[in-house]
Amino acid sequence: MASQPVVNHPIRRSSTSPVPPTIINRITVSSPSSSPLNEKNNSIITTNNNNKESSSQSNVRLIALIPPGPNISLNDYKPIIQASIDARYYRDQDYGLNKQNPIRTRNEVILGIDEEINAETVEIIGNKLHIDIPCRVRLPYLVLQVKDTGRFCGIELGIEDKTGKHYSLFITNKTSSARITTETCSIPLELINKQWNLLRLNLADLTNRAWGVEYHMCRGVIIHASLSIARVYFESIPMEDYELPVFLRTIQNRRK
């Protein structure tokens, strides 16, 4: 599997959308859907629910992980709470091992409102921290809106094929070329420095190209520090910003 270059594109928008605020950084791009999402139709929008697979995802078009839903603070989200607990543990552990000459390690989870995209964000800092989001999602596209912090970072995905076999897919800026084994694949990640990037991963295509098998579901998303995260969600087909529910939009939420 050859290393797939990351191409930078301006955010495409409808005729009524304002000027795009950021650069979009897409690993794979497909045609957008033709009909907008109806936020009142529960059959086509749902949120991640405690690692339980939906009885049927055939009519689901979008599953949100970060934020998990509208009017839900990240401060109350279990994966964020656990990352904060881990950060405190690592700081206490490093201090305990170096009482004579304490090392000030920066393992932190920082929540805030980003003024550029007018959205709540979480930043994880440190070489040990990660945000672990268990899920069982069959939708083939994973979208992440992340901001580069100038440090190493990565995204780890648990993949299951149609036969039930498990694989691990890593997208990271620690490597410059793709590496594949029978059960793991590492792909280089290139982000625009100090800017918000929108990554769309075609998991069905990546699974087939890496291992020659058919994608069935994603069993978990782990985001490794250091990175700022605004949105993470799955979609059935690539969608434009105006087609998304309001709490996941970028362009229409931007402060004027």
Image (cartoon, rainbow, N blue to C red):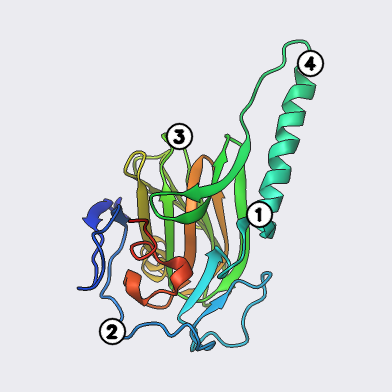
| Left or right of 30 on screen, residue 187 | right
Instruction: Classify mark 4: helix, strand or loop.
Output: loop
The residue nearer to you, when weighing 240 against 143, is 240
Q: Position of residue 159 (x, y in %)?
A: 53, 65
What quarter of the picture does the N terminus occupy?
A: bottom left
Q: Amino acid at mark 1?
A: Asn
The residues bearing labels 1 and 2 have C-alpha atoms spaced at a distance of 35 Å
The residues bearing labels 4 and 1 have C-alpha atoms spaced at a distance of 31 Å
The residues bearing labels 4 and 2 have C-alpha atoms spaced at a distance of 61 Å
Q: Tell me the residue at 63%/26% (across/down).
A: 105
Q: Position of residue 161 (x, y in %)?
A: 51, 72
| Left or right of 111 on screen, residue 18 | left
Q: Residues within 10 Å of mark 2 (few under 14, many from 20)?
A: few
- The label on residue 151 is 3
Pointer 2 residue: 34
Pointer 4 residue: 99
Query: Which quarter of the picture shows residue 106?
Result: top right
- The label on residue 75 is 1
For this orientation, the residue located farthest to the left is: 15
Query: Which quarter of the picture shows residue 208?
Result: bottom left
| Left or right of 7 on screen, residue 131 | right
Q: Position of residue 19 (x, y in %)?
A: 23, 59
For this orientation, the residue located farthest to the top is: 100
Q: Tell me the residue at 20%/73% (across/down).
A: 15
Q: Amino acid at mark 2?
A: Ser
Q: Position of residue 142 (x, y in %)?
A: 44, 65
